[in-house]
Structures are given as structure tokens and as C-alpha cells.
């Protein structure tokens, strides 16, 4: 690995982020959620030894909320006892994460899931976000072409939206309606009358979390449907940027069901068109066309965009084209090794890279989809699946 100035600036940014966030609730929650999604194999070798112990420590610190705390949240949200609104509610948690806890129950004969935000978390995170200003200087040094202040403002707004369960329920309802007749994809219906700033109530769908699927055919189907969902979301204009493993299941009918659609990000039609153009350029091996898309996206100036297109094709190698490919952690390790070998060139491009703030959450969602598909380890013809979905949307 190179010791160039760019790498030193990136390392300084990582160190500053760790120093600023150390001991804060926000950092513990972020690391705990990252540990649930990202395996060690996907942490770059230069950072793994330094960061992985932090992720493991944060994950180990996640403990279930006592039932009395959950009950108080529900009483405050519903102005009464949970039994006034629900026929049944299991006091044993179904899912526990660093930010939320989910319990199963029933209402009017309908199975429901009640997700409770950890008490006080939203206020704590709001206070912690003020610390992000301390990272503006190191971030500008690492990425001098990025409007870091604007990106920080966008991140603050999106994080706080994600911690408002009533806000999440409203967006989830729109996605549920968009997919209500789809044969292969679904979003669990929220019960908006019971959802609140600290509580999300939705239908409960029986199914197997995708990373717990064991049959090769089931894992392949989950990967293909996840790619269809992600590509179609770009065309729909609403990308889910918080796709957690525990909220994605394959139901008894073989549908991919998104149980909780948090972190919704809006995508304009022009960005969807550019995504399709980028995938077509990748299919055709046309670096000039790919460079034009990169420049139009506002990611790099034209000269650097051409370099980035060629470099990107070299890094992802054999998967840059039509045809079934095995997308797994072994592939990820190969790509990371190539990045390490070409780190000097990658960082030289990073110095010129920009990031439109509105792209921040869609890129977060894209990264999560990539990680989940790699963890499924299936052999799929990924490029036409994503391209067709991004072009045509969630058509039946």
C-alpha cells in the first residue's frame, strides 16, 4: 500500500471519526448495525485489524430492552395499555438490534410486528450529530472536491428521518401500495394508525431471513429478487437505504418481502436514466459511454471520468458483462486485492471526486444490496436483471 498524501488524508479522516465518535451512543449503534451487515472479509485489509474489534465490541454490547421499557414506550405512544390496541403481544423480543427491538403480536386476527425505537435514542443521536462538524476539516483534506458541509447536512437530515418511525411508516405504505399486486416482491403493510415517532407497527409475514436460507436455489432466487427490487426502486424513485438482513425474508410463496423499509431516499428520473445508461455501457464494454455517464452524474470531471471507467472495469473484472457470475465473498476478496494493488490510482481519482448530497443515501442503499448479494453467494446473471428493472421498474 502506498503512503501517498491522499492515503494519509483518508487515514487521518478515519482516525478523526473514531476519536470523535468514541464512547458516543451514535457510534455504538452504527458499529453494531454495521457488524450485522458486513462480514470481516468485506473490510479492507488495511482497516480490518483496526476496525473489526470495534464492530465486535459494539455488537456484543447490544442487549434486549426490558419489557417494562417497551411497555412504557407503547403506553406513551397509544395513550393506553398495549392490550387496548392489540389482541396479543409477546413480551419476548423477536429481533433485537442496536437501534430497535421487535415483538410479535396480533390485532383483529391479523399477525403484526411491533418495532420500538430504543427510548431516548433519537434525542441522543441528534446531540451526537453536532460532533460531525469536527470531521469537516479532515474530510475536506481527504476529498477536496466534495462539498463536505452539504453532505454533512444531508446525512443529518436523513439520519433523523430514519429515527422517526411514523415517518418510516408513511414511506413504507407508499412502497407497499406500489408492490401490492407484484407476484414476486412485497413490502409489509404498515398499520399507520398505530405507528408513532418511536413505534412502527406492520403486518408480520412468515418467512426465512435471506441469509439463513440454505438451499442453493433459494439463495439464488433471493439474490435475483433483491437485485430486481433494488433496480426497480431506482425507476420508482424511492430507494430503500436501510436494507438489514433481519428485515428481508423469502416467504412460503417464494416472494421476497421487505419487512421494514427505513432509510427511504428519493431518486429523480434523470438519475434512473443515467443508471440504465451506465449499465448498458458496462454490458457493451464502452468506456467512453461510461465516462460520459460518470461525468453527467457529477461524480468526476470528464478527464478523470474516462480514467475511472477503465479502472472500474479492470477492478471488477470478469463480472463486468452479461452472463451468470458467482457473486460471493471470494469475488469480493479478489476485487479488494485489486483495489489494494491500484490504490494509488484510486486515491488519485478520489481527489477529484464529488458527491451530490442527494446521492448519499441511494449510494448507501446500493452498498447494502451489494453486500447482501455477496453474502448470499449465488450464481446469477446480475447485469440484465438490474438493467431491465432500472429501465422498466417493478412491472409484473
Image: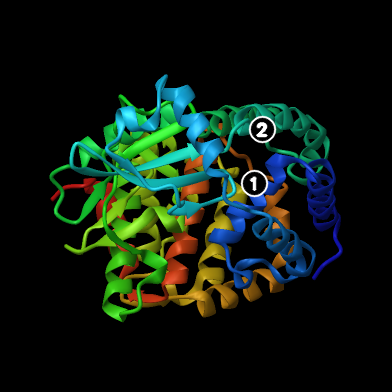
Question: Can residue 261 be seen by looking at this rendering?
Answer: no
In the figure, 335 relative to 304: above or below? Answer: below
Q: Residues within 10 Å of mark 1 (few under 14, many from 20)?
A: many
Instruction: Please give the residue where the numbered disc 2 appears in the rendered image.
Output: 125
In the figure, 380 relative to 358: above or below? Answer: below
Determine which of the numbered discs, if any, sits on residue 299 in the image: none
In the figure, 327 relative to 127: above or below? Answer: below
Secondary structure under tag 2 reads helix
- The colour scheme used here is rainbow
Secondary structure under tag 1 reads helix
Give the spatial CA distance, label 1 vs label 2.
9 Å
Instruction: Please give the residue where the numbered disc 1 appears in the rendered image.
Output: 29
- Quarter holding the N terminus is bottom right
**Residue 32 versus residue 376: which sits nearer the camera?**
32
Marks 1 and 2 in Cβ contact (< 8 Å): yes
Q: Earlier in the sequence, mark 1 or mark 2?
A: 1
Horizontal side of 49 relative to 38 (left or right) equals right
**Residue 75 versus residue 217: which sits nearer the camera?**
75
**Residue 136 versus residue 279: which sits nearer the camera?**
136
Residue 77 coordinates in the image, percent (x, y):
45, 24
Q: Residue at x 37, y 65 (%)?
A: 210
Question: Can residue 264 be seen by looking at this rendering?
Answer: yes
Horizontal side of 265 relative to 38 (left or right) equals left
Residue 352 coordinates in the image, percent (x, y):
68, 45
Amino acid at each position: 500500500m502506498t503512503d501517498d498524501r491522499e492515503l494519509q488524508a483518508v487515514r487521518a479522516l478515519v482516525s478523526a471519526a473514531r476519536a470523535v465518535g468514541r464512547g458516543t451512543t451514535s457510534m455504538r449503534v452504527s458499529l453494531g448495525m454495521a457488524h450485522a451487515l458486513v462480514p470481516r472479509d468485506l473490510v479492507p485489509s488495511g482497516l480490518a485489524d483496526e476496525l473489526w474489534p470495534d464492530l465486535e465490541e459494539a455488537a456484543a454490547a447490544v442487549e434486549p430492552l426490558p419489557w417494562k421499557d417497551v411497555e412504557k414506550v407503547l403506553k406513551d405512544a397509544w395513550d393506553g395499555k398495549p392490550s387496548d390496541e392489540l389482541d396479543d403481544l409477546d413480551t419476548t423480543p423477536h429481533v433485537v438490534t442496536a437501534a430497535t427491538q421487535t415483538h410479535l403480536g396480533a390485532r383483529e386476527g391479523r399477525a403484526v410486528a411491533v418495532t420500538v425505537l430504543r427510548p431516548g435514542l433519537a434525542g441522543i443521536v441528534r446531540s451526537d450529530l453536532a460532533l460531525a462538524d469536527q470531521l469537516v476539516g479532515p474530510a475536506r483534506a481527504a476529498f477536496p472536491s466534495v462539498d463536505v458541509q452539504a453532505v454533512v447536512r444531508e446525512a443529518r437530515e436523513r439520519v433523523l428521518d430514519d429515527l422517526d418511525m411514523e415517518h418510516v411508516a408513511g414511506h413504507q405504505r407508499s412502497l407497499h401500495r406500489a408492490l401490492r399486486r407484484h407476484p414476486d416482491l412485497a413490502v409489509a403493510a404498515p398499520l399507520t394508525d398505530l405507528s408513532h415517532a418511536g413505534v412502527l407497527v406492520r403486518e408480520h409475514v412468515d418467512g426465512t431471513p435471506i441469509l439463513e436460507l440454505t438451499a442453493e436455489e433459494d439463495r439464488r432466487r433471493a439474490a435475483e429478487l433483491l437485485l430486481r427490487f433494488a433496480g426497480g426502486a431506482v425507476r420508482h424513485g424511492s430507494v430503500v437505504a436501510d436494507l438489514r438482513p433481519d428485515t428481508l425474508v423469502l416467504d412460503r410463496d417464494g416472494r421476497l418481502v421487505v419487512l421494514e423499509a427505513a432509510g427511504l431516499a428519493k431518486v429523480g428520473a434523470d438519475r434512473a436514466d443515467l443508471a440504465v445508461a451506465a449499465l448498458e455501457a458496462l454490458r457493451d464494454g464502452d468506456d467512453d459511454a461510461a465516462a460520459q455517464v460518470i461525468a453527467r452524474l457529477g461524480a468526476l470531471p470528464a478527464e478523470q471520468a474516462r480514467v475511472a471507467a477503465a479502472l472500474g472495469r479492470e477492478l471488477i473484472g470478469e463480472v463486468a458483462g452479461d452472463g451468470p457470475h458467482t457473486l460471493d465473498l471470494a469475488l469480493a476478496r479478489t476485487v479488494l486485492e485489486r483495489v489494494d494493488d491500484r490504490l494509488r490510482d484510486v486515491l488519485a481519482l478520489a481527489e477529484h471526486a464529488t458527491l451530490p448530497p442527494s446521492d448519499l443515501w441511494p449510494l448507501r442503499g446500493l452498498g447494502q444490496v451489494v453486500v447482501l448479494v455477496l453474502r448470499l453467494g449465488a450464481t446469477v446473471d446480475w447485469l440484465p436483471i438490474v438493467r431491465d428493472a432500472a429501465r422498466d421498474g417493478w412491472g409484473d
